[in-house]
Image (tube, rainbow, N blue to C red):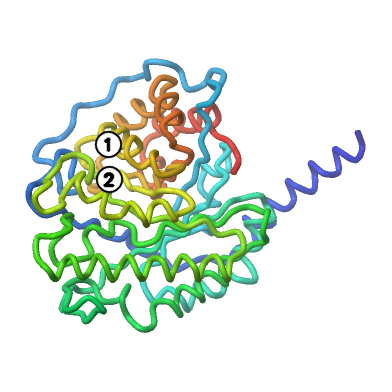
Amino acid sequence: MFGSVLVLVASVLLVHAFLRDAPTSPTQAAPPQASPDPPVPTGSPSPSASAPASPSAAPSRSAASGAVNGSKLLFGIGTEADAAARTQLAKQAPVRMLTSWYNGPNDLSWMSGWRTGTVPQAYTAGYALHLVVWTGDPEGTVSTAYGPACGRGYPLSSRFLTDMQQLAQTFAGRAGGPPLYVTLFTEFQTYPCTDNRWSPDTQTTNYYKALQDRYRAAYAVFHRYAPNAKVSLGWGGWQASYDSPGDGGGRSLFGHFADIMRMSDFQSFQAMANDGNLADIRDMVAILGGYGPVMLAHYKPDNGSQSTFDADVRAIFTDAFLRAQTRAGLFAVSFMDNTNLSASTATFTFVKAAVARYGRSW
């Protein structure tokens, strides 16, 4: 009994030490979300023309009662690990994953400082870490082994793999300890000059082929330098909402990345539609679950709509919906940031109860 008390006290002290001592990352704007090219799918990232209906006052089933067997999820919150650990949700509910965004080379200077502080403290406190790799650099002509291509240059640049090595070394943990989940190239369908389609032109196809090669190389880098790494490709959640077989768009794009998804440790997608995300979540989990466990890597209405957020969480965090999604492969959900949670006491109370009901450790 006395030994158990000592272990409990030690665990509490480690979490408090992490929250107290973790260095603060620079304030950063949330990465923008690019809109897909026509045909515009339902629930695309582009702003909706009309506001969604107001959510009901209460969910169909209470999130405060006992958890349903098989419906447990790993919950995370971003946008940077140090600040995420200080959110009220992380303090008051079993959030066991801290999400951080890498938006380009300028982040390396401050992120590298976490290697001896924030990162080991988080792992010691029992958190899994989640790294989202995104790039918003300008699109243009790039040379590839497949011929001329058009798209964002940084992922195909000579420095990219060296930067990924530095990130892997920064976020590395011990094998068998809390995992490092990596969502690589989130919203990658928007990286070519023409979005969401495999073959609208030769330059787009060449870009995707080169990006696949770079994914394989980055996957190897993370596994070499971070023994606890699990790596995935980051899909934009609108991709399953339409189909364009003639040019490999919509649902037809998934097959062109089947080899990449099969080699990955898990699957990732985002849900950031402004007019509701329930259908995108259901459709993406149904497709990606055929390739492995699925993480909703960052959830938030792109335009910050509180009414959409409120309606979404009250529809998502129900026994029936989560039972179906976890059976289809969903294992984790990360809130992109704390903005909508902190804007409404009623919403925070509901989500806190949902995380307590459905949350699990890694």
Q: Amino acid at mark 1?
A: Asn
Q: Residues within 10 Å of mark 2 (few under 14, many from 20)?
A: many
Lateral position of residue 54 relative to residue 173, left or right: left
Residue 52 figure quarter: top left
Which disc is residue 277 wearing?
A: 1
Lateral position of residue 166 relative to residue 258, left or right: right
Nearest to N terminus: mark 2 or mark 1: 2
Lateral position of residue 138 relative to residue 331, left or right: left
Of residues 267 and 321, the one drawn nearer to the viewer in this rendering: 267
Q: Quadrant of the N terminus?
A: top right
Of residues 180 and 11, the one drawn nearer to the viewer in this rendering: 180
Q: Residues within 10 Å of mark 1 (few under 14, many from 20)?
A: many
Q: Is residue 306 above or below residue 256?
A: above
**Secondary structure beneath disc 1?**
loop
Q: Position of residue 181 (x, y in %)?
A: 50, 55
Q: Position of residue 271 (x, y in %)?
A: 30, 44
Which disc is residue 237 wearing?
A: 2
Q: Residue at x 41, y 27 (%)?
A: 317
Q: Position of residue 336 (x, y in %)?
A: 39, 49
**Secondary structure beneath disc 2?**
loop
Count of marks placed on residues: 2
Q: Residue at x 46, y 73 (%)?
A: 164
Are discs 2 and 1 less than 8 Å apart at CB?
Answer: yes
Q: Position of residue 217 (x, y in %)?
A: 43, 71
Of residues 57 and 317, the one drawn nearer to the viewer in this rendering: 317
Q: Amino acid at mark 2?
A: Gly
Q: Is residue 232 above or below residue 327?
A: below
Q: Residue at x 25, y 73 (%)?
A: 137
Measure the C-alpha gap from mark 2 to mark 1: 9 Å
Q: Residue at x 9, y 40 (%)?
A: 49
Q: Quadrant of the C terminus?
A: top right
Q: Is residue 282 above or below residue 12?
A: above
